[in-house]
Amino acid sequence: MLDFENEAFMEQIEELVERKRWPQLRDILIQMAPADIAQILDELPEDRLPLLYRLLPKELAAEVFVEMEPDLQELLIKTFSDTELKEVLDELYVDDTVDIVEEMPASVVKRILQHADPETRKSVNEILKYPEDSAGSIMTTEFVDLKKDMTVADAIKRIRRTGTDKETINICYVTDPSRHLLGIVSIRTLLLSDEDDVIGDIMDTNVIYVNTLEDKEVVAQNFSRYDFLAIPVVDTEERLVGIVTFDDAIDVMEDEATEDIEKMAAITPSEKPYLRTSAFSTYKARIPWLLLLMISATFTGIIITTFEDALSAYVVLTSFIPMLMDTGGNCGSQASVTVIRGLSLNEIEFSDMLQVIWKEIRVAVLCGVTLAAANFIKMMLVDRLLMGNTGLTVPVAGVICLTLVFTVFCAKVVGCTLPMLAKKVGFDPAVMASPFITTIVDAISLMIYFQFATWILGI
Amino acid sequence: MLDFENEAFMEQIEELVERKRWPQLRDILIQMAPADIAQILDELPEDRLPLLYRLLPKELAAEVFVEMEPDLQELLIKTFSDTELKEVLDELYVDDTVDIVEEMPASVVKRILQHADPETRKSVNEILKYPEDSAGSIMTTEFVDLKKDMTVADAIKRIRRTGTDKETINICYVTDPSRHLLGIVSIRTLLLSDEDDVIGDIMDTNVIYVNTLEDKEVVAQNFSRYDFLAIPVVDTEERLVGIVTFDDAIDVMEDEATEDIEKMAAITPSEKPYLRTSAFSTYKARIPWLLLLMISATFTGIIITTFEDALSAYVVLTSFIPMLMDTGGNCGSQASVTVIRGLSLNEIEFSDMLQVIWKEIRVAVLCGVTLAAANFIKMMLVDRLLMGNTGLTVPVAGVICLTLVFTVFCAKVVGCTLPMLAKKVGFDPAVMASPFITTIVDAISLMIYFQFATWILGI
């Protein structure tokens, strides 16, 4: 397998390119997987790309093309003759063509559609009509369809005749004359059945399918739940219009996890890999949240200003503000992130809310008491005895420890509740992660802190 | 498709159970997917489980069994007669049996292994020997193996004869007499070839495979990179010992994303779904990190104590500490989380470090200046004019804004560097997420803050 950390290998390739050893290069490349070739081409100087690409045999070339980054695809298409473009397009599956078309500027799209064969053009245009992030937008229209009165021998004959153009032949779809989905039959069932068996008798009629407008995230969840190779997509009249294959579902799963993680860190999700995004785009994805959160932190400032006198009387109180705020924030994000992930894997539903809160309350009590005890011992032994911080009297330590217990409690409850409420009212729960929870918990912890200080220290 | 949010459906099921309408229940259940049936059984009273489970036809029953939670599997096994246990085990694929065995207490494992057929027992014991999280531990030993001098007709005959017991027939593996992997051939290639073609001529010899000891996360990455249906697993002598199928890879991908997210929120990852973990286990997964981070926050306390005098002279400075710390923390986690995700998707490598830092520096300057400008305007208009906070003079505002710029800068650089360094020295980068970065950035931002205060305000 290709080791991408292996710089010696890339150096060897670069040397071959420099010394124009094309046949040798070709022999190395054709032994590799399309994704790996695409990565190598990506790392070589752009002006060499068209030449290197043309070393590849036709079918492999198309597979490599699909794996390349959009900017390099565009560059290549611009150097293609009309015949070359047509050759690549003929080898592509419809859903891959759609992916490419979606990334290209209008002029290139026009040229692609001109050179695609009429049927592909029609399919591409149809798929492009579906909303972004819908099942329709990621499906392919090339699947094997069978009729229920065919025999297994007929079916295998049909697969042999039409199979080359289909993205998968592992699952075949049985439809009636008006294209309604009647059942599915796997190639395995076909091969393990008798040649005279009738498709209608051996097909599986309990088919799980999705609608063209279904969110692609839901489509991907079906794959991990049911171990599907492909899932059929039907239109509003329940006619079969396409299928989504597992490789596209894996991509969606990966993208959705990335999106969740980005939202949890208060970043507007981007479709592009990090190193291919400009600094300005990254800035745009991050700054709105930073501004919003910065302005929200005004509340904590106001709370502190209100208790200015208390703070100047007991300066020692100020030095524990960061610890209290951070601990509250950490407790809150532990709870919120756990619940967000549970929601997005469908392990937790809104109806579990009371159960979740009850659990977090118990965890919070355990955590709060442990942290307070550890902190009390640390303050008495380290801060007071070792470092001679005489301001840290037992009542002050008491205020800090009580604040810890109550802050942890509030943080956990707020942390687990907000994502579920967000989901209920139709927001993305992932937004209710660390940064937002932290901002809210900061304010809460300061209010608890000063309240205890007022009661216990009488300020 | 089953709508799990649909409580009416579950109520109907519960009523049928209560009224003991077994035939009706059976008719509903057998139309559903195994994962859905398992979920329904999970939600019904436990004492009904053995009875309900026995309603299912043998093959479906085994499929449902695989999808159930370990505690219910254990409960069922204990009610099984020896014959029933044997029937279920005979229907299971080896890798599913291993998964079950791994979760059961010793007494149940012993009983399972006693009733599995000798070959399965041997395979299970072999797979159990591989380290947790290795390719070997998630593979199945049931695959279709072909010889290179077979014809396509021979191969199809062999698949028909042995295929029922194999987890997949979609990819077949060509081995030599000493079990070395020579190539792979898909069922599609077989079907689209002539009956007289020889396997050795049509097989694909550029096979990507993994070693039994490879990390399962790397195995899963291969699936998303190469769109595999299955990947062959070889031992140290390069002999084919098993395959990992895409459904197991999808599970690994999901688990790894969850693990990353949990680590990012300073939680020790757990294998169990949230609602099935006891409050005490959740506490144990969270408290070590909370304690560690709480103790680390001592530094921020020390810094504040050092500048006690400055703070009592300018009490207004205290009220901006939370905002500065939060903004620094948010900037740092944006950078770290982006880099952590990039590392785990292999989009970023250690060799990209300088490029990443350079990018974050530019983003940091843009963000820092924007935040400082927005904050300056807000302080002058809202805090000073509107709320009459006269302590907020222009020099004080200057200190705050300059601190913002430098804090954002440090936060972004620290945030993007630490995960990469962690990976380089063999730690999990995900640990270098928000909580740790926040703790470090807190200290940095306070030092910057007081330094500027000393210089500009002369305290």
Image: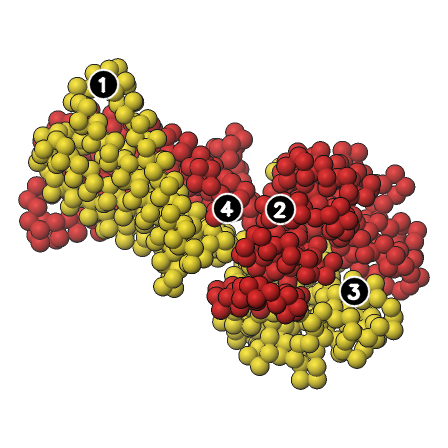
Chain colours: A red, B yellow
Amino acid tagged 1: Arg
Q: Look at 66% across and 34% down and name the residue there.
A: A106
Q: CA distance from mark 4 to mark 2?
A: 16 Å
Q: Look at 28% across and 36% down and name the residue there.
A: B405
Q: CA distance from mark 4 to mark 1?
A: 43 Å
Q: CA distance from mark 3 to mark 4?
A: 37 Å
- Residue wearing tag 3: B189
Please tell me whether mark 4 or mark 2 is closer to you in this view. Answer: 2
- Residue wearing tag 4: A276
| A183 sits to left or right of A282 | right
The residue nearer to you, when weighing A428 against A125, is A125
**Badges 1 and 2, same chain:** no
| B223 sits to left or right of B367 | right
- Residue wearing tag 2: A75
The residue nearer to you, when weighing B266 against B214, is B214
In what element is the residue under mark 2? helix
**Badges 3 and 2, same chain:** no
Q: CA distance from mark 1 to mark 2?
A: 55 Å
- Residue wearing tag 1: B384
- Contact flag, marks 3 and 2 (Cβ < 8 Å): no
Q: Is residue B344 above or below residue A324?
A: below
Q: Quadrant of residue B408?
A: top left
- Contact flag, marks 3 and 4 (Cβ < 8 Å): no
Whether residue B262 can be seen here: no
